[in-house]
Amino acid sequence: MHAPDDPVLDGRYRLTGLLGTGGMADVHRAVDLRLNRPVAVKIFRPGTDPAGEQRFHDEAQTLANLNHPGLIPVHDFGIEHHRAYLVMELVEGPTLRAQLDRERLPLGEVARIGSGIANVLAYVHTQGVVHRDVKPSNVLLDHGRRVRLADFGISRLAGATGLTSADVAVGTAPYMAPEQVRGEHVGPPADIYALGLVLLEAITGHREYPGESWEAAAGRLSRPPAVPGDVPGPLRRALLAMTDPDPARRPTARQAAQMLAAAATGDTGADAADEEPPGSTTKRYLAIALGLVALLAALVVAALVGGKDASTQAQPSAPATAAADPGTRGGGDSGPRFPGPPSFSPPHFSPPSFGASDLPHVPNLPSVPKVPESVGQDARSLWQQFSDWLSSVF
């Protein structure tokens, strides 16, 4: 129901009640008189110029062309009496801020909400838009528990076009990334950092960096967020990565969504194994190479020690040539004797006969050392130990 005296914006949108207010705009429940449907109208506070109005028009068109189930669609936009406004879908349901004020959420629900927001961020970042103001009051939970992200790109739109009287107010102090506080370039990593602080607040029940002033916001430059140690491993790792002080080390929105989805379902198996930390593969192969070198060295040492033991046990006997064959080089009488030409009596042939004493003495050859059985056992033991080590690595 609406009263006849409710104000009508631009001759089309009847404002029926205030839904919320922020630093640069107010949000009203309204009725689109042309299409006879409920809508939400965000009206920026006065303070613009003709050039700013054109830039607002260009930015609003960009927002209106975004299409994702986790976004609040923009139906219309315009400027009346130097007041810029956006007309959006009316979402019935509490904000995350209202939900957290009523009760604490289970960790799985926190991770699920975070994954939903990160998926929306992933889509919009690919469209070249940065939110800059991710906070609990901009997250809506409709009656189907679907996560919706409001005010996407509006802070960029307002801050870049000079449509607000507080032109410098881009972002909300408790959720600003360090680069925002320092006045540096604000890109997609700033949204990931803010989302990490939102989820951390949902877990702990308090803001990590309280206070609305810039002085309070500067506190994050001196210390990183404190993620409780009792938070389950997958969720804790996600929060630590998302709130890294260095924007270059934070995950992308898509990676954050995957990490949070795994934390929500408790799935840390195959997917987590597939996405190893950078450098882990190199370290693994280096460990294998060092293990092979150590095994080879052990085998060589075992072989050398075993060969030495065998050589001491089986010394070759000295040749007896000098004693047994003194005349082989000096022409002595004790050399080998061969009988004269055999007698030939046809038709019979008699081969020459030799006695044992007639054969030359052949010296004893050195015996081949036998490898002790203990060396083979040592080698097999070393190989088994190396195989067990490989199994533990993989």
Image: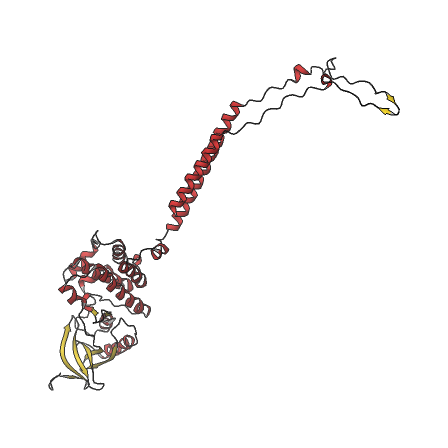
**Residue at image coords 44%, 41%:** 292
Q: In the rendered view, does 272 fall on the left or right side of 182? A: right
Q: Is residue 168 visible?
A: no
Front residue (pair 194, 145): 145
What residue occupies the far front of the structure in this picture? 348
Taking the image as shown, residue 393 lies to the left or right of residue 303, namely left
Residue sitting at x 46%, y 38%: 296
Locate residue 337 relative to residue 12 in the image: left or right. right
Which quadrant: the N terminus?
A: bottom left
Task: Name above or below for residue 358 compared with residue 264.
Answer: above
Q: Residue at point 43% right, 36% down?
A: 381
Q: Position of residue 289 (x, y in %)?
A: 43, 43
Given residues 247 and 75, the one toward you in this image is 75
User: Which corner quadrant of the image does residue 348 belong to?
Assistant: top right
> Where is residue 310 drawn, in percent x and y?
51, 26
Q: Is residue 236 above or below residue 353?
A: below
Whether residue 27 appears in this view of the structure is yes
Image colouring: secondary structure
Instruction: Where is residue 331? Give x, y as percent.
Output: 74, 15
Residue 275 position within the rendered picture, expressed as x and y whole percent measured from the top left: 36, 56
Q: Residue at coordinates 38% horizontally, 46% vertically from top-left?
A: 393
Q: Quadrant of residue 245?
A: bottom left
Quadrant of the rendered image containing residue 75: bottom left
Please, is residue 170 above or below residue 298 in the view?
Answer: below
